[in-house]
Image: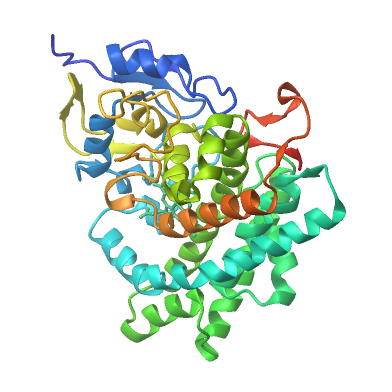
Amino acid sequence: MAHDTGTDAASRVPRRYPFSRVRLEPDPQYAELRRSEPVCPVQLPYGPPAWLVTDYDLTKVVLGDPRFSRAAAVGRDNPRESAVDLSQVAESIVSMDPPEHTRIRGLVGKAFTPRRVAELQPRATEIANGLLDDMIAAGPPADLVGSFSFALPAIIICELLGIPEGDRHAFRGWADATLSTTTVTPVQEQEAFLNLAGYLAGLFAERRERPGHDLLTGLVQARDHDDRLSESELLVLGMALLVAGYETTARQITNMTYTLLTHPAQLQLLIEEPALLPGAVEEMLRFNVFGSAINARIATADVELGHVLIRAGEPVLCARSSANRDEKVFTRADELDFRRNPNPHVAFGYGPHFCLGANLARMELQVALGTILSRLPAVRIAVPEDSLTWHDTTILRGLAALPITW
Ligand code: HEM
């Protein structure tokens, strides 16, 4: 095959990106690109042209190779979907490279341990049951998004961070407005962001005075004992845990419930063999297209990728949901198969920036779906499927509401 060297992303006609967003399905261009042009130029609504990687192995190369940098995205114009460029927050964990990144991950790792997540599981089940008790008492139909999907991860993140019960209502209001891609104006969003940052800064100060057993205390102590997390790093980290961990999980709860209810044979299999639940969650993470490619990596040297020469300074985006449908790695990649094993999907990323909250997300998703299925064994969508409203402009895909009956 001819080497496609000597070109750059700007000198070829780029495809417009993101591609179409229909329900949770991949745009057909992904399959075509994996076959014909696994590294191809694209143009996003903002920023310069970029290279889009759609192949599984090449995705792992970009996400794992230190020559593709996140820190180099700070202070330059980056390919992105919205006007705001979160990559500019230099102290954010996602905008760092090793060794700074390794240092922060190590500190958070001390506070955010698998044990802490495991300890939360019985409590998460209790919260899920409580929310379903209320929903069942009010009677069908109910909107899963409003009654369950957002409330569960919101309560869990509040308990994990140690937000006092009396503050949770305000906290969630600010978090929803900060993360909202629909309902508030940019001014309201900015106001909510500042309120949230101010509130978290106050809580950090309080935990320093009166340590608790929560994640915020863990982070404060990781800083105070070794003086290794700066004040602003603490704050940005607190916000990052919230931003990265709340809406993602909330939307996935609804998306996965929808997937179950629209794949009756796999749902039946899961009801007959509840032990398949962890595998079912992994398979839905792989199968459902959740977001488009974000967080461009910037090449710090000329690198040959596939048969394309990426020049130093050029941005590269990885379409993880395309990698997850790569037929070279996943047999019958377009089939949902709860028995799939192994399932090395990259829905939580790969390499140094692999999702910090993957274990928490997995636990929450298993608890959410397991509780729904055991409490509402006859659950089904309460309206014709084509009347469901999808968020088709937001970075994370999902349903605006999921009316269910049981
Ligand atoms: C189903 C839910 C979730 C999905 C699909 C998801 C997905 C991802 C992905 C793909 C990345 C890598 C981004 C990149 O390399 O550019 C990431 C990073 C991250 N996630 Fe998650 N995530 C989820 C839930 C969570 C939760 C519950 C938390 C924490 C409470 C969390 C915290 C983070 C953080 C802090 C990072 C940045 C890590 C770093 O840069 O080192 N995520 N997530």
Q: Left or right? Give the position of 330 relative to 283.
A: left
174 vs 357, nearest the viewer: 357
- Report the number of numbered marks: 0
- Spot occupied by residue 237 in the image (x, y as percentages of width and height): 46, 63
Q: Is residue 9 above or below residue 401?
A: above
* The C terminus lies in quadrant: top right
Q: Left or right? Give the position of 59 relative to 155.
A: left
Is residue 10 something one can see in this rendering? no
Is residue 359 something one can see in this rendering? yes
- Spot occupied by residue 213 in the image (x, y as percentages of width and height): 50, 83
Most extreme residue toward the front is 272
Q: Residue at x 59, y 26 (%)?
A: 23
Task: Please name the colour scheme applied to the rendered image.
Answer: rainbow
Q: Residue at x 78, y 29 (%)?
A: 383
Q: Is residue 43 above or below residue 377?
A: above
Most extreme residue toward the bottom is 209
Q: Where on the picture, by quarter, is residue 331? A: top left
Q: Residue at x 60, y 49 (%)?
A: 250
327 vs 293, nearest the viewer: 327
Q: Where on the picture, by quarter, is residue 358? A: bottom left
- Spot occupied by residue 284 in the image (x, y as percentages of width and height): 47, 38
Most extreme residue toward the right is 138
Q: Residue at x 33, y 65 (%)?
A: 104
* The N terminus lies in quadrant: top left
Q: Left or right? Give the position of 239 relative to 103.
A: right
336 vs 71, nearest the viewer: 336
- Spot occupied by residue 90 in the image (x, y as percentages of width and height): 40, 54
